[in-house]
Image (spheres, rainbow, N blue to C red):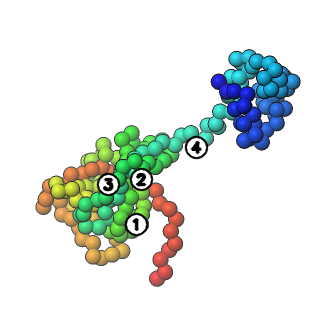
Amino acid sequence: MLTPQEIRDALSARNMTIRDLAEAVGMNENYLTKSLRGMRAFKPNELAAIEREFAPPEDEQDRLRKIPLLGEVPAGRLTEAEQRSGRWIAVSDPETPPNAYALTVKGDSMDLVVPDGTTLIIDPDDKALWPGRRYVVQTEDGRTTFKEFQADPARLVPCSTNDEHQDIMLGVEPISVLGRVFSYTIRDIPRRNG
């Protein structure tokens, strides 16, 4: 339950007057003033109405969910990825998979799809390979990359302006699919001059 001081602080923070609050909650302004000064006790229904009035609005912020940002994934050759813990990012898409996590793209082998620095949202429960979908994969020795899968023959394909990046043929060495890319979060970047 809110204290009189917390109510006064909330009024100040919202730039509301006692009259504004009294009208909003249907309370006698004189009673509200006396209650805030400690000259009268709030009735339970009055406090409940005030708490509802000061409750945060149900907007986008309330629907945000946080998922872990686990580190970086190379968009280039298979290399060890940097892994960190303790960082989280907010996602607003209600269909974000329940076990999703985020990785930051490092490199240019997928720059026709997303630039270096993009945050990928990964669905670790979706590992079935489908042509044209993008995945994060890992070798037995822990090297990872982010690429697009294509079939006939089965391979991981870079989508890059840099011709140095080559397809990775599947079946040459054991590779585990860590998850499918569900979505991307990209900050605005300037276009390249060219």
Give the amino acid type for the residue marked by disc 2 in the picture: Ser
Labels 4 and 1 touching (C-beta < 8 A): no
Distance of label 2 from label 1 (alpha carbons): 15 Å
Q: Earlier in the sequence, mark 4 or mark 1?
A: 4
Identify residue for label 1. Answer: 116
Mark 4 neighbour class, 10 Å CA radius: few under 14, some 14 to 19, many 20 or more: few
Q: Earlier in the sequence, mark 2 or mark 3?
A: 3
Q: Earlier in the sequence, mark 3 or mark 4?
A: 4
**Given the current orientation, which residue lies at the most extreme right position?**
30
Q: Residue at x 46, y 44 (%)?
A: 66
Secondary-structure class at tag 1: loop
Distance of label 2 from label 3 (alpha carbons): 20 Å
Q: Point out the frontmost of discs 2 and 1.
A: 1
Q: Position of residue 12 (x, y in %)?
A: 75, 40
Locate residue 80: give its quadrant: bottom left
Q: Point out the frontmost of discs 2 and 3.
A: 3
Identify residue for label 2. Answer: 183
Give the amino acid type for the residue marked by disc 1 in the picture: Asp
Identify residue for label 3. Answer: 83
Give the amino acid type for the residue marked by disc 3 in the picture: Gln
Q: Position of residue 18 (x, y in %)?
A: 82, 32
Secondary-structure class at tag 3: strand
Q: Residue at x 35, y 53 (%)?
A: 84
Secondary-structure class at tag 2: strand
Q: Residue at x 27, y 65 (%)?
A: 157
